[in-house]
Image: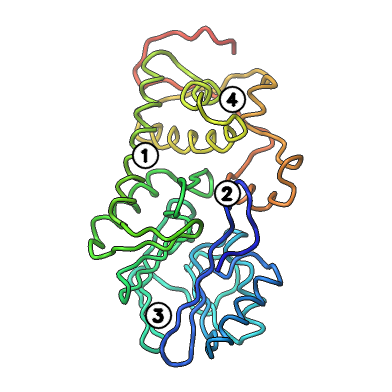
Amino acid sequence: MRAPNPSALTLSGTNSYLIDCGNGEAICIDPGPPIERHVKALIDTADAKHLKITWIVITHGHPDHAPAAAPLSGRTGAKIAAHRNLKAPHDRALRDGETLLVGDTELVAIDAPGHTFDHLVYLYPRERALFTGDTVLGEGTVVIAPPGGAMRAYQTTLARLLTEFPQVERIYGGHGEPVSDASTKLREYIAHRELREAQIIAELESEPRTIPQLITAIYAATDSRLWPAAARQMLAHLLALENEQKVQSRLLNRALTVEERAILSPDWSASASDDAEVVRAELGTDSTPELRLYELTGSTRKTTLPN
């Protein structure tokens, strides 16, 4: 059941799922944002199928996925299960490998850091399926933005899902339509991140670059309105490469140009006022961004950019 919260980051809206547990009970996965008509739709749908929602299961704490848990729990008496790092109140903290059993339905929690560090993916053995939240979507790719997310952790999660769960055939993502070929989708996601990193390294082999320069080179064919989100992904890649000592950077002590600020710290309020909370959570935006110059480690090239 899709929440009525479409936007640039939530696509056509956040997916909530109801699972019939076979004993008159239901599990709700990701109840979504606290929109009254969506909460009511979840309850009404369960009632129409003669089900009582007894458990609410959260993939992660972003504002388009988790906040409706509290009002839904208040109206149904359902308990809430989530990652131990979730800041919002919950009744059961699920650790990696733990099983939630309701009726004849099993959900197995899989620790899935990367998009956030309070993220769980759930294995649904009955359908050989994964409920992936914002780890894998039904369309597009996932935002990985520091400090709430980390690229290497995310890539490790993707690799784990592919290699440790070969039986999985279907993916139910937090946005978009279901994915019928799970392994192909996971390989596409892994290859996408590897390609982007190769593009970054290729650009830095030419000369040192700032993130705005990398964005205008690598995302030249992409709508410029999406460049600020791309810049956060770029930062996640560069932080990983710096941590591995493959890239080094230094701060440029000068004011940002208008174009640089538009990429590194845009004014989202003008175009996304209804989505501002989601933007802050997803992108981890910074009102006073640093402008850093990145180069490959050991490079002796000199930059002509001013300090």
- In the depicted structure, whether residue 133 falls above or below residue 197: below
Query: Measured from the top left, where is residue 182 in percent x and y?
Result: 32, 57
What color scheme is it?
Answer: rainbow
Q: Residues within 10 Å of mark 1 (few under 14, many from 20)?
A: few
**Residue at point 35% right, 33% down?**
195
**Quadrant position of the C terminus in the picture:** top right
Q: In which quarter of the image is the N terminus?
A: bottom right
Classify 10 Å Cα crowding around label 3: few (below 14), some (14-19), many (20 and above).
some
Q: How busy is the neighbourhood of tag 4: few (under 14 within 10 Å), some, or many (20 plus)?
A: many
Q: Residue 272 carries which label?
A: none
Q: Which of label 4 and label 3 is nearer to you?
A: 3
The residue under label 4 is 291
Please name the residue that numbered disc 3 is placed on.
100
Mark 1 and mark 4 lie on one chain; the one further toward the N terminus is 1
Location of mark 1 (residue): 192
| x and y, in percent, of residue 125 in the image | 30, 74
Query: Is there a contact, CB below 8 Å, between mark 3 and mark 2?
Result: no
Q: Which of marks 2 and 1 is in front?
A: 1
* Front in this rendered view, residue 92 or 245: 92
Q: What residue type is labelled 4?
A: Leu
Distance Cα–Cα, label 3 vs label 2: 28 Å
CA–CA distance in space, label 1 to label 4: 26 Å
Mark earlier in primary sequence (1, 3): 3
Q: Are the residues flagged by discs 1 and 4 in contact, CB closer than 8 Å?
A: no
